[in-house]
Amino acid sequence: MSEPPPAPPGPPPSPHRPAPAGRLTALQGTALYVGAVLGTGVIALPALAAETAGPASLLAWLALVVVSAPLAATFAALGARYPDAGGVSTYARLAFGERTAAVVGWCFYLAVPPGASAAALFAGSYTEAAVGGGTATRTVTAVVLMAIVTAVNTAGLRVTGRLQLALSGLLIALLLGAVALSLPQARTEHLEPFAPHGWAAIGSAAALLVWSFAGWEAITHLAAEFRDPARDLPRATAAAVVIVGVLYLAVAFAVVAVLGTGAADADAPLGELMARGMGGNARLLAAVAALLLTVGTMNAYYAGAAKLGAALGRDGALPGWLSDPEEVEAGPHAAAV
């Protein structure tokens, strides 16, 4: 009589790891994923890609949407099978050992503060372009955004998830509304010639756009916080892939068809598109979009980084005071700050 096959390995052992609190729903997870991937690049990159490859840049967007799907599915599968706050650091430990896990964890954790600061200043620059005020406006906007996101994440994942759900819903409605209302102004002549710079320019456009699809790894640090990681994380990921893909393709098509390949000359192409469809000041609309996109991205990355920092403190890769295994309702305060 043959023996039954061994059970698949579970999450890596950690004596200090608390049981999953199950605070995130699949819908909130979808919103966090959308926020992590859909960054401020959507404001200008569709126009820059169109300038590089013409209407054929739409093929670059489509190819990257297709290629990002298996990448997102890979992280979803890993997160569902190994739901640990270490995320990518945990996967590196399973494959390569503790030292590699520590280095990977440091790289991800320490990249968030400068990245968040740059994103906040980027939003500040759009705010300054809309209302004036120079450096003071940019700086104050950035500081306020960082303070808001830090406060939200120290309040706990329930607050983080609810805020992200509201932000993502508002952003999706805003972008789809801008596309739908501007499409009556689309011109078929803007789609000809389809590849004015040759087919090779599609590759150049893809190289310009590739970082718009980064971020699928960010929410793996929150896998253990889903109510049912094995079920909810893959669902959230699949929904986010569809939403992000549809939004990118819709905005890119509208920018090309409505504004033409000269859209890159505009200060804020997305704002110009929104103004065409909704009316109003293009710079002000771009500032609103930039603020929503930036807060959403920062909120998602802060949430993941806070859990990662706590996990690294738990595992000895960072000071132990970053991790508080007794916290259940609130987020890891020290790691978030």
Image (cartoon, grey):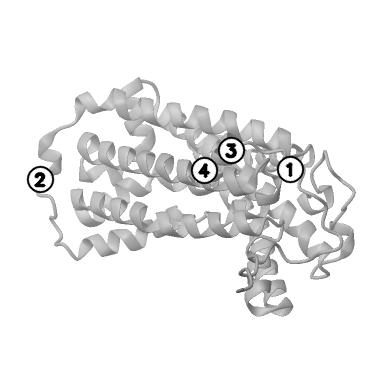
Q: Is residue 212 left or right of residue 60?
A: right
Label 4 belongs to which residue? 235
Label 3 belongs to which residue? 26
* Residue name at image x 70 percent, y 61 percent: 86
What SS does tag 2 mark?
Answer: loop
Label 1 belongs to which residue? 150
Between disc 1 and disc 3, the foreground one is 3
Q: Position of residue 91 (x, y in %)?
A: 63, 67
Three-letter amino acid code of the residue under disc 2: Glu
4 and 3 marks in contact (CB < 8 Å): yes
Give residue 92's quadrant in the image: bottom right
The mark that comes first in sequence, 1 or 3, is: 3
Q: Position of residue 303 (x, y in %)?
A: 68, 47
Mark 2–mark 4 Cα distance, whole angstroms, equals: 39 Å
Three-letter amino acid code of the residue under disc 4: Arg
Label 2 belongs to which residue? 192
In-front residue for pair 185/99: 99
The mark that comes first in sequence, 3 or 2, is: 3
Visible residue check, residue 115: no
